[in-house]
């Protein structure tokens, strides 16, 4: 069988500073090697160190094949990113696990572990909060607090692996935050997570979801990665999309779909369109027709998601019959569409809701 080789454009990110220390687990092998050389150590230590860092160790003490003196030196100047679970909810229905993690600065993020027939998938957050302000989403309620580092994205995967004694085979960048608004760190994460000396998750097994940051889609095309690009479209026309997604005022549907066409020309990858069905807003027969019309000429798949109600808004999901009718309409017009299976329905909380709930509980406890 033909072996395909994908070259991730070199991203020589040396690592940022976290709490006055070097964010060493965001560094790629080249950067770790340079660090080891700068420390006057033999070069082979770099691969040992990189493997440990990518395995999700919590401290340098765990690196048993690295001399104690070097571990101590690294510990003085470097920081290993970790996530601390504050809450863990396990679905009694299908075993889906939802985590709320605390980061080094006390900020909270969410992550979800799902089991499918083909293996385990982790849904990771890419930012604390989000500045895109989509009206149906709990993550955007309070704007953006900060970007996650590549190491904090990785730590969500390694923690879930260790906690459940499993290997993650698929990753979706669909948790809190807009990955293309944190472009460099998202690219660095993709490079690290797919590294054969690290977690070695194939890029074909990774999806990146965007609300439609056209500049980011164009930049991403330059890297020509075999990941799946997911577009949160959620509307067939600008009138509806402007009401729910402020990003549409900067890049409207025409601009977005044009960027998708160009992206597809470069990558030849099928694009996924996410469409959250909201009762009375975007679920009519006419909407399905308009959507099919707009997607003509793009090799794609539409994921229909019953909108998850968020306390702060009045959006409702249509009933099951209406959702199926929407899917059938799309299919009859030649558009491949599936209704997304709801995992963890008993711990139901969409993007950003669990974090909010946890924060409220902590604030209440602080108050008492
Ligand atoms: N910021 C990126 C990725 C994270 S959001 C994006 O918007 O694509 C992951 C997905 O959840 C997106 O498709 C988003 O539109 C969807 N989503 C957010 N809140 C939702 C809700 N209340 N109901 C259904 N889908 C929701
Ligand atoms: Fe941000 Fe995505 Fe939520 Fe929109 S749907 S606010 S882009 S996380």
Image (cartoon, helix red, strand yellow):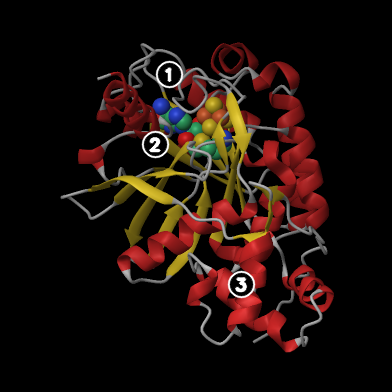
Q: Is mark 1 within 8 Å of ligand 1?
A: no
What residue is shown at x 32% (from left), y 60% (from top)?
115
Q: Quadrant of residue 138?
A: top left
| Percent of width and height locating residue 112 | 38, 49
Q: Does label 2 point to a residue whose CB lies under 8 Å from ligand 1? A: no
How many numbered marks does the figure carry?
3
Image coords of residue 32 (percent x, y): 74, 71
- Whether the residues at callouts 2 and 3 have beta carbons within 8 Å, the answer is no
**Of callouts 2 and 1, which one flags the residue occurring earlier in the amino acid sequence?**
1
Quick one: 256 or 338, which is closer to the camera?
256
Does the residue at mark 3 contact the one at mark 1 (Cβ under 8 Å)? no
Question: Which is more N-terminal, label 1 or label 3?
Answer: 3
In 3D space, how far apart are the residues under numbered discs 3 and 1 (Cα atoms)? 63 Å
Position of 49 compared to 220: left or right?
left
Label 3 secondary element: helix
Of residues 121 and 284, the one nearer the viewer is: 121
Q: What percent of the width, then of the height, locates residue 41? A: 77, 83
- Figure quadrant of the C terminus: top left
- Given residues 327 and 71, the one toward you in this image is 71
Secondary element type, mark 1: loop
Reading the image, the residue beneath label 1 is 284
Q: Residue at x 71, y 63 (%)?
A: 27
């Amino acid at each position: 069988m033909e072996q395909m080789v994908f070259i991730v454009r070199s991203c020589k990110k040396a690592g940022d500073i976290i709490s006055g220390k070097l964010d060493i687990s965001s560094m790629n092998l080249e950067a770790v090697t340079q660090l080891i050389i700068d420390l006057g150590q033999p070069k082979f230590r770099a691969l040992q160190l990189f493997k440990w860092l990518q395995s999700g160790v919590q401290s340098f003490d765990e690196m048993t094949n690295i001399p104690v003196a070097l571990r101590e030196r690294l510990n003085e100047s470097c920081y290993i990113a970790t996530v601390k679970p504050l809450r863990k909810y396990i679905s009694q229905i299908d075993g889906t696990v939802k985590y709320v993690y605390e980061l080094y600065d006390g900020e909270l993020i969410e992550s979800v572990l799902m089991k499918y027939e083909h293996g385990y998938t982790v849904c990771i957050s890419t930012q604390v909060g989000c500045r895109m302000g989509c009206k149906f989403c709990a993550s955007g309620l309070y704007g953006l607090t900060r970007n996650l580092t590549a190491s904090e994205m990785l730590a969500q995967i390694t923690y879930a692996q260790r906690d459940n004694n499993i290997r993650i085979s698929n990753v979706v960048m669909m948790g809190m935050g807009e990955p293309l608004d944190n472009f460099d760190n998202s690219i660095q994460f993709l490079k690290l997570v797919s590294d054969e000396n690290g977690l070695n998750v194939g890029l074909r097994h990774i999806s990146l979801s965007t609300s439609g940051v056209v500049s980011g889609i164009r930049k991403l095309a330059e890297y020509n990665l075999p990941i799946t690009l997911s577009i949160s479209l959620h509307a067939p026309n600008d009138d509806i999309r402007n009401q729910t997604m402020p990003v549409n005022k900067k890049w409207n549907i025409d601009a977005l779909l044009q960027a998708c066409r160009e992206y597809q020309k470069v990558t030849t990858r099928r694009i996924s369109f996410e469409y959250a069905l909201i009762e009375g807003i975007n679920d009519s027969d006419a909407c399905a027709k308009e959507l099919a019309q707009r997607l003509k000429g793009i090799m794609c798949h539409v994921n229909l998601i019953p909108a998850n109600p968020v306390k702060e808004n009045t959006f409702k999901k249509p009933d099951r019959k209406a959702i199926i009718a929407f899917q059938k309409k799309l299919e009859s017009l030649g558009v491949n569409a599936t209704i997304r299976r709801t995992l963890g329905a008993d711990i139901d909380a969409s993007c950003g809701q669990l974090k909010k709930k946890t924060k409220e509980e902590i604030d209440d406890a602080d108050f008492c």
